[in-house]
Amino acid sequence: MNIAPSCCLCDAAVEDRTHLFLNCEISEGIWGLVLSRLGYSFRAFHTWTSFTEWVALRDAVTSRTLKKMVAQATIYSIWTERNNRLHVGESRSPATIFMFIDHFIKDVILGKRKLKKFQPLMQLWIRYE
């Protein structure tokens, strides 16, 4: 395929993994909404290393299980948005993408609510709603 090297989300930089998933203004907007929902005060990650360290870190803000689910859902949603813009010509705002992530996380938690480690996750996810 003949695809331009510029970012499909912002068209302001060369598209690479770090830019697309972390540094693009659209991705930063999505991460800001996600991190705020989790109770974090910072708004984005600057490097892939800082992102992976955050996912692996045990902290008092939220559970690692929820962080892993949210990280997966957010990365997937950004990739889906990129492909929709590239192949379909449709675009959504960060707020609309976050609504998809919110529904996805709630559905996963409800689907696994009988598992002990998933029981407190809904309360953690919606406490800053």
Image (cartoon, helix red, strand yellow):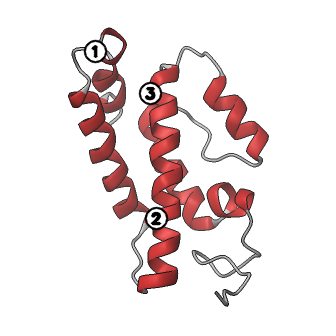
Q: Quadrant of the C terminus?
A: top left
- Which of disc 3 and disc 2 is earlier in sequence? 3
* Measured Cα–Cα span from mark 1 to mark 2: 29 Å
Residue 55 visible? The answer is: yes
Mark 2: which secondary structure? helix
Label 3, residues with CA under 10 Å away: few <14, some 14-19, many ≥20: many
Could you tell whether 115 is left or right of 82 in the image?
A: left
Q: Amino acid at mark 2?
A: Thr
**Residue at the spot x=26%, y=24% of the render?**
112
Earlier along the polypeptide chain: callout 1 or callout 2? 2
Disc 1 target residue: 119
Residue 61 image label: none
Where residue 100 appears, as percent x and y from the top left, is 32, 54
Secondary structure beneath dot 3 equals helix
Residue 28 horizontal/vertical position (percent): 59, 57
| Label placed on residue 66 | 3
* Circles 2 and 3 in contact, beta carbons < 8 Å: no
- Gap in angstroms between the C-alphas marked 1 and 3: 11 Å
Picture layout, residue 47 above or below residue 29: above
Image quarter of residue 107: top left
User: Which residue: 66% across, 54% down?
Assistant: 22
* First-in-chain label (1 vs 3): 3
Q: In the displayed structure, would residue 61 be above or below residue 7?
A: above
Residue 30 drawn above or below residue 50: below
Number of marks drawn = 3
User: Could you tell me how far apart the alpha carbons at marks 2 and 3 are, in whole angstroms?
Assistant: 21 Å
Residue 33: give x, y in percent of width and height.
46, 49
Is 107 situated left or right of 53 in this image? left
Name the secondary structure under disc 1.
loop
Q: Report x, y in % for residue 7.
A: 66, 76
Residue designated by label 2: 80
